[in-house]
Image (cartoon, rainbow, N blue to C red):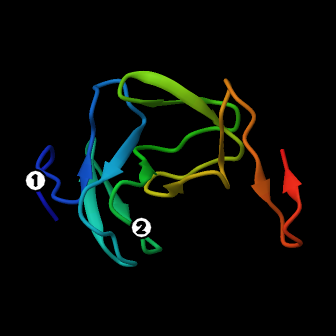
Amino acid sequence: MQPEGKSRKLLRIHRDDNVLIVVSPVRPGDRDLVDGHELVFTQDIAIGHKVAARDIKVGEKVYKCGVPIGSAKEMIPAGAHMHLHNLKSDYIATYTLDKDNVFVK
């Protein structure tokens, strides 16, 4: 684990961001210290993807680069991967495919 503020896996771009950018691949069992709290990762997360810096409530605005990029569709625990499965745009429609390859909004 790195000293606080010296993470080698995660990057906070703006002080108000509640998501962090993965800058080194994350593997299950990896740990990091963020805002005085230890994050333990449970899945592989690729470079460039987002993780929650702290627990994010349903409907809460998600901030990246100091600006809101959408809202949480479900409760997102600290360290969890954030993508279309748990984050929706508040500005444009977000479409994904369901298990039958049908678009859902």
Does 27 appear above or below 39?
Answer: below
Q: Which of marks 2 and 1 is in front?
A: 2
Quarter holding residue 38: bottom left
Circles 2 and 1: CB distance less than 8 Å? no
Q: CA–CA distance between discs 2 and 1?
A: 21 Å
Name the disc covering residue 20, or none: none
Q: Disc 1 on helix, strand or loop?
A: loop
Q: How many marks?
A: 2
Judging depth in this view, the residue of 99 and 77 nearest the camera is 99
Residue 10 appears left or right of 28: left
Question: What residue appears at the point 72 percent right and 41 percent down from the top-left corner?
Answer: 94
Question: What residue appears at the point 35 percent right and 76 percent down from the top-left corner?
Answer: 27
Q: Quadrant of the N terminus?
A: bottom left
Quarter holding residue 90: top right
Amino acid type, residue under disc 1 in the picture? Pro
Q: Disc 2 on helix, strand or loop?
A: loop
Does 8 appear above or below 58?
Answer: below
Most extreme residue toward the bottom is 28
**Residue at which label 2 appears:** 45
Residue 36 appears left or right of 89: left
For label 1, the crowd category at 10 Å Cα-Cα, with few meaning under 14, some 14 to 19 and many 20 or more, is: few
**Percent position of residue 55, x then y:** 52, 44
Disc on the earlier residue, 2 or 1: 1
Judging depth in this view, the residue of 78 and 19 nearest the camera is 19
Amino acid type, residue under disc 2 in the picture? Ile
Question: What residue appears at the point 70 percent right and 47 percent down from the top-left corner?
Answer: 74
Does 100 appear above or below 81?
Answer: below
**Residue at which label 1 appears:** 3
**Percent position of residue 47, x then y:** 33, 61
